[in-house]
Image (cartoon, grey):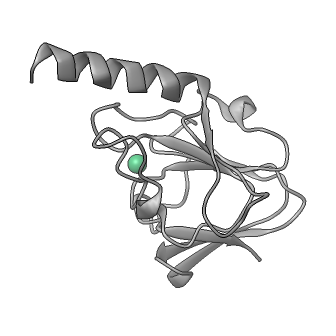
Amino acid sequence: MKLSQKMTRLGLCAAAAVGLVVTVAGSASANTILGLGQGAGACPANYVCLWSDYGYVAGGPDHKFGSIASDQNIGDMGKLERNGALWDGMQDVASSVVNNTGSSICFYENNWYTGLEFKIGPRERWSSVPSWINDKISSFKYC
Ligand SMILES: [Ca+2]
């Protein structure tokens, strides 16, 4: 990797650390934050948060971006990519989740809310999701 590419990656990583808010097409008032801090407390009020590792920790910056927060349904976690190659979505990597909403949230094995379903109640925190859904979540919705 050239130095300039490395610098670009580091820059993007810094942006992730402070949280980059993007608006997903089709939901003008909804927000998805790419890149959270560590710990369940990093999840904003009224958001659903997912981290790629156990214990509310994000994984390595060279792979999946590692953590997201959203206040809306996400039908395809692989489509959250932004800023080129660094962030390539969060398909099949989530290992810990926080539901900071007043609704139940259902996580799914496949895109668009199909396959295995893992339902959690309002305000629930899972530092380790069950093994049968670990590294398999591809979509989630209010349910
Ligand atoms: Ca994981």
Q: Is residue 140 above or below residue 113?
A: above
Q: Nearer the viewer, residue 97 or 80?
A: 80
**In the rendered picture of this protein, how many numbered marks are placed on residues?**
0
Q: Identify the image quadrant of residue 78.
A: bottom left
Q: With 71 as the anchor, is 76 left or right in this view?
A: left
* Quadrant placement of the C terminus: bottom right
- Give how far across and how far down residue 74 sits, in percent: 60, 66
Residue sitting at x 47%, y 55%: 80
Residue sticking out furthest to the right: 102
* Quadrant placement of the N terminus: top left
Q: Is residue 23 above or below residue 59?
A: below
Q: Nearer the viewer, residue 27 or 107?
A: 27
Residue sitting at x 81%, y 49%: 100
Residue sitting at x 75%, y 57%: 30
- Give how far across and how far down residue 132 sits, in percent: 45, 68
Residue sticking out furthest to the bottom: 114
Q: Identify the image quadrant of residue 142.
A: bottom right
Q: With 143 as the anchor, is 36 left or right in this view?
A: left
- Give how far across and how far down residue 29 sits, in percent: 79, 57
- Give how far across and how far down residue 68 sits, in percent: 57, 45
Q: With 135 as the anchor, is 86 left or right in this view?
A: left
Residue sitting at x 67%, y 68%: 73
